Amino acid sequence: MTDLTALEAELRSAVRGEVGFDVTSRALVTMDASNYRRVPLGVVAPRDADDVAAVLRVCRERDVPVVPRGGGTSIAGQATGTGVVLDFTRHMNRLLSLDPRTRTAVVEPGLVLDRLQEAAAPHGLRFGPDPSTHSRCTLGGMIGNNACGSHSVAWGTTADNVRELSVLTARGQRLRPGPRWAGAPQGLRELAGTELARLRTGFPDLPRRISGYALDALLPEHGADVARSFCGSEGTLGVLTEAVVRLVEAPRARALAVLGYADESAAAEAAAGLLPHRPLTAEGMARDLVPAAITTHLPRGDAWLFVETGGDTRTQARARAQTIASAADAVDTLVLTDPAAQRALWRIREDAAGTATRMPDGTEAWPGWEDCAVPPARLGVYLRDFRTLLAAHGLRGTPYGHFGDGCIHARIDFDLLSTAGVSRFRRFSEELAHLVVAHGGSLSGEHGDGQARAELLPKMYGPQTVALFERAKAVWDPDDLLNPGMLVRPAPLDTNLRFAVLPREPVDVAFGYPADGGDFAAAVRRCVGVAACRTTHTSGPAVMCPSFRATGAEEHSTRGRARLLHEMLAGELVTDGWRSTEVRDALDLCLSCKGCRSDCPAGVDMATYKAEFLHHHYAGRRRPAAHYSLGLLPRWLRWAAATRTAPALNALATVGPLAAVAKRLAGITPRRAIPRLAAEPFTRWWRRRRRPAREGGGELVVLWPDTFTEHLSPTVGEAAVRVLEAAGLRVALPPTLRLRRPPVGDGRSVTVNPLAVLRGRGRVCCGLTYVSTGQLERARAVLRRTLDLMDPVLETDAPVVVLEPSCAAALRTDLPELLPDDPRAHRLAGRVLTFAEALERHAPGWRPPRLDRPVAGQTHCHQHAVLGDAADRRLRAAAGLTGDLAGGCCGLAGNFGFEKGHFEVSAACAEEQLLPSVRTAPAGTVVLADGYSCRTQLDQLAGTRARHLAEVLAEALGEGAG
């Protein structure tokens, strides 16, 4: 048995990189993007090849396995292990050189593919292979799996684009594998020489043969290329420390021919016939995976081929695409040259690995048979046989993928939770392996064998070739130290399943989790590890995951947090359940931005999971000070308004020592200024400025007086009233008295009873601050009182206009999920509209004043994730406000940016997109930020006053509008 304490101490003394044997470090790498889970002893992040050599020496002396790991997006289980995991993403992640003349680059294994592409682009070059995980997969992982991507029909697999490697063997030998036997370990040439006949006849001739070791690359007619043979070895032969890769010329312009077919088999049969036209891609997808909103813009059909062409000019690329469209036997065709339209379609294809994890009815679907490949000419008939086999086992799956290469991806609704379901998984796997081999195919066409398919390699290669694989492994790694259990002598495909450790009975939780059948474990299972949250750069409207981009640490990614929650439920590594400090600390830097709710292809909602965890973690215990100060903010602000002490409090907040003491007691970072309270709350202005509304007139809308508008920025509410009334709408506020049938909108349902206000019983509230701090019982109580007050509104058809995006998102999602059994909660959630949505739907004939000015600022992260901003974009365009708002998260995120210990991350999030967009804006730019947090962040970090869209439009209407 390994002495973990001694192993950790020896590694710490031997390497300069980080060594982690703690619970969090281990829990983060128990899984990749596969169905499998293995618990490692520890994790090392080496700084260089010498560190790698030191780790190998220590582990060899102690007989401890070593598992190289890149982005952790492998789908067959090969990036998990029981020994020491080498994490190359932290330090060995550099582009060492790029030579445009020779079209080569020298990279370290942890370099993310997109960083190489960005460096090559100014020279008109790119790396050919481009998996859908290109924004987070690493070059080392791509070499380990021999990754391909959608452009392999043009530029081949990773192995086709590798010139030379730097490799450390398990026994510490430094090799430089390349062509003509360069860098071959002792005995490899002799082994190949005795098996020439087998190497020439035992390997299927396929563009996507990824299964097994590529020993046929050692044939003399193939250049005896040791580097090419090493590609796809899944970390079992040696540890990669550097690579020289080939770059290709990128087309200056691209076009996309979208070809519609009756079904995916028809599309598959057509794909092979288009290859003589030399397309860049030939990807296939059926209607099941394409959002309905997109299909309306596609050609007629129930399946489509996306065939990309390139050229020196857009005209040339279009001509080639039109030639393909004319040659295709398609139901309907469409040629796109607009880059934005092409990107929208490719985003759907890239997200499919996540979206395919759910069947149309919400049933879970899993990898395992994700990427079989057959000869392209046989793909159509193979797909029909594949569908027949699925039906015979009572299974469902949606094939998609690289039709031009004969490679199909399919997530299948296996039941991997029950003994019977796992048995069916095995039977199906064995029969599908027979089917693939019968069609002359490869068990893996892109993602490698790992644990998912290695057991079945004898069906593809026969026992003698598999024995040859074992002999090759022994030449490279005679001690079986590197990633044992992968490719040779594999573990059975139905063991180590990551679901086996989860509780069988639903966990008692506060939220309803309607999309997961009320099961928190099922919600956590949504994270399949595709790691879209690990992108280090983002552009456009995307939000997820701001804390990871700020820190670069896996535990601060959505995936990392989901892994810790998984281990919490498993109870093996994280043993103290909801009281876990490891889970608490990982969730601490989650901004609850909700970006993952929309940007995660699998629909993970970490903001909800965080609130759930905090609810249980602090149950019956003292909470952090910020939970009382900021979590109960609505209560404190109502108290200040009722006692009319806001001016006095504002004055005290300017006294440095007093403010410092107040912030320390409240758990607020000293680097934040305390926001000023409004001298006159919005509802007081409302009562002062108007008489009871008259009957008739425009359509009634109920304006929600959220906490931020009410007490901190009432000018937003005042402006919204002016604009809504200018648009012909009749504005009312929610009732503040609970009566049997109080009138709505005539002013008589408003009370000024200070006692009711102080107790919080006379004001509606979305419960946002209670939810974000995990005070879910308080949130429920607040929301029940709110529904009681809103009863008369819900008896009308009046929409509820919410100006603060975070409050609108809370009403749309948190309300019905916290009170799933109260039908009023669902009715109110369905009534909630943003300011722009209300104008568009209920005043469609109104035209806003023209401003004809550019805009800068940010779309609120909750609006992006929950509400959508299409109506806002249209309203801005109608007002002549040009340009797009930044994506990402402002970093303040309600209470997050005010809490002690969060300032650096908060500021880093703002510096990603928001602050640069404002700093570089030309003179006369309108700075927009509908969220109070976003406006506060801009004020405190940039000294910039941003405004709600309602304020901008009200100002343009002029003084007479009110």
Image: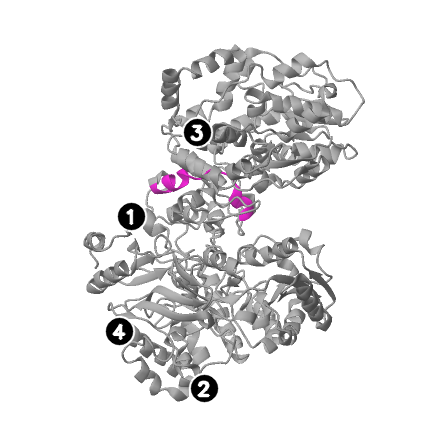
**Side (left or right) of 607 relative to 52:** right
Q: Secondary structure at mark 1?
A: loop
Q: Is residue 356 visible?
A: no
Which circle, 3 or 4, is nearer the viewer? Answer: 3
Mark 2 vs 3: CB contact within 8 A: no
Precedes in sequence: disc 2 or disc 1:
1
Is residue 502 within the magenta segment? no
Which amino acid, by three-letter code, is at mark 1? Answer: Asp
Residue at left offset 70%, top offset 14%? 690
Is residue 591 within the magenta segment? yes
Mark 4 vs 1: CB contact within 8 A: no
In which quadrant of the rendered view does residue 722 lie? top right
As drawn, the label of residue 898 is 3
Precedes in sequence: disc 4 or disc 1:
1
In which quadrant of the rendered view does residue 313 lie? bottom right
Which amino acid, by three-letter code, is at mark 2? Answer: Thr
Q: Which residue is nearer to you in this view: 871 or 643?
A: 871
Which residue is identified by label 4? Answer: 478
Residue 715 lies, in percent from the top left, at 61, 21
Q: Which residues are magenta?
A: 582-599
Which amino acid, by three-letter code, is at mark 3? Answer: Phe
Label 3 crowding class (10 Å Cα cut-off): few <14, some 14-19, many 20+? many
Residue 921 lies, in percent from the top left, at 57, 37
**Side (left or right) of 109 relative to 870:** left
Which amino acid, by three-letter code, is at mark 4? Answer: Pro
**Side (left or right) of 72 relative to 538:** left
Q: Secondary structure at mark 3?
A: helix
Which residue is identified by label 2? Answer: 201
